[in-house]
Each structure stands twice: as C-alpha cells, then as structure tokens.
Amino acid sequence: MSVATSRGLQARKAPWAPLAKRATPYIVCVGGFLIAWQILSVILGEARLPGPINVVVQTWDPYISQPFYDDGGTSKGLGWQILISLQRVAIGYSLSAVVGIAIGGMLGMSRFIGTGFDPVVQVLRTVPPLAWFPISLMVFQDANTSAVFVIFITAIWPIIINTAVGIREIPQDYTNVARVLKLRKGAYIREIVIPATVPYVFTGLRIAVGLAWLAIVAAEMLKADGGIGYFIWDAYNAGGDSSSSQIVLAIIYVGIVGLLLDRLVAFAGRKFSKGAA
Amino acid sequence: MQTLTSAPSSQAVSNEPFLVIDGVSKVYPTPKGPYTVLDNISLEVAEGEFICVIGHSGCGKSTLLDLVSGFGQPTRGEVRLESVPIREPGPDRMVVFQNYSLLPWMSAAENVALAVNNVFPHLKRNGGARTIVDSHLAMVGLSEAADKKPGSLSGGMKQRVSIARALALQPKVLILDEPFGALDPITKEELQEELLKIWQEHKVTVLMITHSIDEALFLADRVVMMTNGPAATIGEILELPFPRPRQRSQLMEMPEYYDYRNRALDFLYRRFAHDDQ
C-alpha cells in the first residue's frame, strides 16, 4: 500500500517537471512516425500515398482553414461533415443507450429472461454493422434513418450485455445487506442495484460509442447525403489531384473525433460512478 | 425484501431460553451424496450473553451462525429466538460481516442511515433517524469521518461503521463473523475493548466467530469450541468465570486465565488438531 501511495505521489508531482522533458517521448515517437510516413510516401510516389507535408499543403485551403464553409448541397467543410455524422450518432446512440439499459436491466434481473435471450444476444452481437444496412434500407426506405438504425443496432449489444452482467455481478455482500435489512424492492433497486451497476453500464456505453463511430463512417460511405464517411467516399470517387490528401485528412479527423467521444463517455462514467468502481 | 409483518411477538409465557439452537443439522447435497456440515447441534443462549464460537476453518462456524441470522436454513432441527423459529434474515438479528459489507458509494453516515431509515421508517419523518445515526457513529468514535466514503476509511474504521450500523437497529442478537480477522493487532485490541464497552451499555446478545483464543477469552461469557468438519458438532463449552468489566492486563495476570487458555489450546491443537496442519 505505502509503496503504491508513494508512487502515486511521484506521478502527481510530474507536472512540475520541465515541460520539455515530458514532451520528449511524444516528440520523438510521433516525429519518427511522421518521418517514416513521409519516406514511405516518397518511395510509393505522392500520388499514391501523400506524405504528411503533402496532406497539409494540399488540403490547407479550404479543408483545414475553413472547416465550416458551405457551398450548398453536400459540398461543405469538414466541420459540418463531422457534425452531420455526430448528429446521426447522437440520435442512434441515445436510443441504443435508453433501450439497451432497459433490456439489459431486464435480462440481468430475471434469470429466466436472461438465460432465454442469451442465444439471441450472442448471435446478433457478432453481426457486422454494415450487414444491417440493406435490411434497414428496405424497412425504412430512407438512407438517413437507416444510418441511424445501423448505429442503434451496432451500439446496443455491448450496452445490453454489460448492464445485464453488472446486475448479475452485484457482490453478495450488498445483497446480504439488503436481505438482513429487509430492503423493499424499490429501495433495493435505487440504493443498491443502480449504483452497483453504473460502472458496468458505462463500460458498455464506452465500447458502444466506439462501435457507433466505426459504424457511422462505414454506413455513410455506402449511402448517405453528407457526413464524414460520405466525404471520404466522395473524395475517392472524385479522383482529383488532392483526393488522397483529403481522404488522409478526413481519416485523421475521424480518429480524433472517435478518441474524443471515447474520453467523453469515460469522463461521464467517472462522474456518475460515485466511487463504486 | 419480503415484507413479512414482524412475526407474532412471543411475550406469551414460556420458560424457553432467549435463543435456542435446537438439534440442528445442515446437510448439503453433492454429486457424491449428502455432505453433512453440522451434525445435531444444540445450544441455549441467555439474553445479554456474549458467546464466542471457535474452531478450525471449515468446521462450519459460519454455517451455524447463518442459521441464526437466517441466511441459511437447517436441514433438521430449528433455531428459535424468543420461541419464534427463524426462517429468514431480519434486522432483529443484525450481522457484522467479515468484510464489512458497506456500500462504497455511500458515506459512513449514509450507510448507517440507509439501515435506520429502512428499519424505522417512522423516525425518518420527525428527524429521529439522524439522531440515531449520529449517536451511533459517535459511539464508535467516528463522528469526524461520518461523511467519508468507505474507500477512504481504514479497515478498523470500516468495521466500526459496520458495528454502528448493526447496533443502530437495536437488534436482539448481534452476530459477528470474525469481525477483527483482517485488522492489525493494535486496532484489533482497541476494537475488542470498544465492543465490550458497547455490549455492556446496550445489553445486546452477541454471537461472535473468532479464530483467536485470546480474543474469545477476553470477550466471552462462554466459548463454544467446535469439532472439525464434516459433521461438526460442539465439542466443549468453556464457561469463563472472569469478572467484568474486564481489563486485558488484569486478565493476563490471573492464573485461571492460563488454565482456560490451555484447555482451549489442548482442544484445538491436540484433541481436534486440523488434519492438514
């Protein structure tokens, strides 16, 4: 214990160390990565694989410098494209969170339902996101709704599974307390089940947001008006001089946004867990 | 969780002792046939008595106390408190669990308050619950730490909260399952002394499991020594004549103390030495 604490103290002292010293590993490793990328680009030819310098030069105007230009139609800045994608994710992901927690709660509370539906969950959760796309296009007859549905159906499984597991894994210590106090059902759910399950639910939500972001980019490439996935596919089809640079830039944006979403859900999870984890 | 109205109070004249363990056996079915943990155990406990149960690991001490707390049901025989057979756990037989069983998302005071509010719902409205919580935390010397969560309390402090929670419910029987096993020797001695003080003030009947002969001799009126499992039973009961209030130092100077200590040692390490020791 004492060893761990003293290490913790050292780690917390680190911000006082010179900034340059802390930045060194990032500069060396990221710089090395960029140099390797640039060399590879030179070998392959920059038309096939633009290096980092080409990407910045070729996409500076308008893609980097004007993220929110709007020329009408689907010709919009990357900021708008990402917001379009995020909006779809927000709708599909919120729906999957609400429905997933409710279903997961039922599967966790009732051994009968939990056991009975397990095969369904296990089979459906392995279906790749895009496999849902054709059927949802047929059902909804609308690309935008279908994309939202793909997000929903992709994100829901980890939420269901983790919520159900969280409820089943409530430590016996806590249920023993409930039994000896003769806690009423409502108080048991409010005071024990929910707080004990929140960390599991957020594990599911965190996996789900990553999957949702993966799925939306793929779904938009297939069929959509606008969105970052659409932008990538459109740039590819346009086949202009700077197409590959545009694609690389969009990929970097996709990665950064995905990371931010992940961190956002992790942060919310810590806020809501109240020290139960 | 079950809302059984409290069993008909047995003020009816009966000369039966306060707590009666009446010929109980506990048999678990296993694939290899029935496995008898406890075999025909009988014990009578007077109101306000302090009983320590001692025996080797796996001898069924916890199983025996589970039958009193109601977490387990005997295969044969029954346990009666004030002539009423015990069928389920309830706050009149409050348990101090080995691993404290505090809810980590609640502060010390909230843990106690959850129990008090649930068991005495009428007190919640007139603010009496708060008084009970505060006075019991003060009793175990934790007023300062009332708003701390279990995660930032030491083992000894957590066990104090657990004891405060149990006593706040004014149980008829207090059941402690090796409450001080995980504590360092100094904290252990402190808590033993506090438990004795509290016991004398509250006049509660105590059943306590322990592994420590010295702990049992310091605390108990009677020490119940169990034979080894399977089919464990009560091997011998030591009636301790030591006067109260007890002082550890005075006790250690009494020649009788060592007579009893040797009898317990003889029982545990010669007559019923553990097989694998």
Image (cartoon, helix red, strand yellow):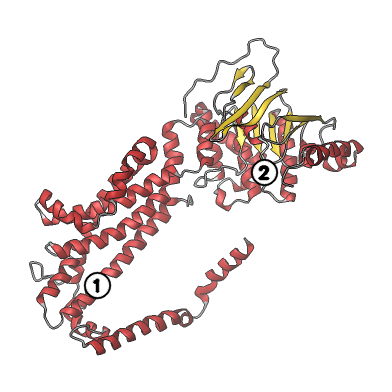
Residue B76 as seen in the image, left or right of residue A137:
right
Task: Tell me which residue sits at (76%, 30%) in the image.
Answer: B235
* Secondary element at tag 1: helix
Nearer-the-camera pick, B238 or A182: B238
Q: Amino acid at mark 2?
A: Gly
Between disc 1 and disc 2, the foreground one is: 1
| Residue at (14% x, 55% y) in the render | A134
Q: Position of residue B73 (x, y in %)?
A: 57, 27
Residue A272, given in percent of the width and then of the height, sits at 41, 51
List the single residue furthest toward the front: B32
The chain letter under disc 2 is B
Nearest to the observer: residue B104 or residue A70: B104
Image quadrant assignment for residue A155: bottom left
| Residue found 21% across the figure and 77% down from its top | A64
Q: Can you tell which mark lies on residue B72?
A: none
Residue corresponding to mark 2: B141
- Tell me the CA gap for discs 1 and 2: 60 Å
> Which residue: 20% across, 54% down?
A150
Q: Looking at the picture, do discs 1 and 2 lie on one chain?
A: no
Q: Position of residue B6 (x, y in %)?
A: 53, 20
Decide which of B249, A139 is in the foreground and name it.
Answer: A139
The answer to whether residue A249 is above or below residue A35 is above
Mark 2 surroundings within 10 Å by alpha-carbon count, few (fewer than 14), some (14 through 19), many (20 or more): some
Residue B183, horizontal then vertical, whole percent: 68, 49
* Secondary structure type for disc 2: loop
Q: Which residue is mark 1?
A: A251
